[in-house]
């Protein structure tokens, strides 16, 4: 939707929640399901989805609106992937704390997010062991401005907060 409508129009569409927006979302879902069926027939281990839902300190829209408009559509796409025996990978930058549990609930196997933005302690309490985490080392503060010891500390902190044999950690 963001790419089709542009960011400003996308947010205006969400403010109004018109019937035209719902038709467009349903049409995109059908389009995506056709592509998912094509890709799921290929020898991939999983399919990757990505939408940046988080800002620096909050979700870009209200969690209730995300759950009402987007969660059911993602759930249908993820169901189709999982029925094909594939893993679901989902990327979102920013503070996605309010919907991360929803993403896991509807079938995300690997969640790619910025643990430095969501918070290491929050990730440890809410995601560790529930989902494989793909994250990077703090690229906003530690990598550009930290000393080598700060980077080592950040790596250790990320491993401790997200790494577990029950969910796993993919760090890059």
Image: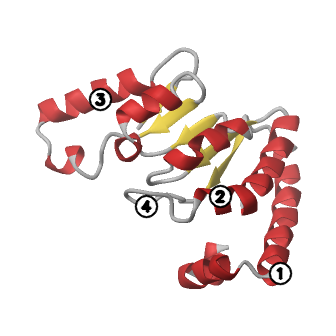
In this view, the mark in front (4 or 2): 2
Marks 1 and 3: CB-CB under 8 Å? no
Q: CA distance from mark 1 to mark 3?
A: 47 Å
Residue at 21% in and 28% down? 152
Marks 1 and 2: CB-CB under 8 Å? no
Residue at 81% in and 74% down? 22
In this view, the mark in front (1 or 2): 2
Residue placed under numbered mark 1 in the picture: 19
Q: CA distance from mark 1 to mark 2?
A: 18 Å
Which corner quadrant holds the C terminus? top left
Residue placed under numbered mark 4 in the picture: 55
Residue placed under numbered mark 2 in the picture: 64
x and y, in percent, of residue 159 in the image: 37, 24
Say what secondary structure mark 4 lies in: loop
The numbered mark, 4 or 2, whose residue comes first in the sequence reads 4
In this view, the mark in front (1 or 3): 1
The numbered mark, 1 or 3, whose residue comes first in the sequence reads 1
The numbered mark, 4 or 3, whose residue comes first in the sequence reads 4
Q: Is residue 68 visible?
A: yes
The numbered mark, 1 or 4, whose residue comes first in the sequence reads 1
Q: CA distance from mark 4 to mark 3?
A: 23 Å
Marks 4 and 2: CB-CB under 8 Å? no
């Amino acid at each position: 939707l963001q790419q089709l409508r542009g960011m400003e129009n996308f947010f205006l569409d969400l403010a109004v929640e018109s019937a035209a927006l719902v038709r467009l979302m349903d049409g995109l879902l059908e389009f995506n399901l056709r592509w998912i069926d094509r890709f799921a027939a290929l020898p991939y281990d999983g399919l990757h989805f990505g939408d940046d839902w988080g800002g620096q300190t909050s979700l870009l829209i209200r969690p209730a609106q995300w759950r009402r408009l987007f969660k059911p559509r993602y759930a249908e796409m993820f169901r189709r992937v999982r029925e094909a025996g594939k893993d679901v990978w989902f990327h979102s930058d920013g503070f996605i704390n309010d919907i991360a549990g929803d993403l896991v609930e509807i079938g995300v196997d690997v969640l790619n997010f910025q643990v430095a933005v969501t918070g290491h302690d929050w990730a440890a309490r809410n995601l560790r062991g529930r989902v494989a985490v793909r994250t990077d080392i703090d690229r906003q503060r530690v990598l550009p401005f930290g000393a080598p010891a700060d980077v080592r500390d950040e790596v250790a902190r990320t491993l401790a907060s997200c790494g577990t044999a029950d969910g796993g950690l993919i760090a890059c």
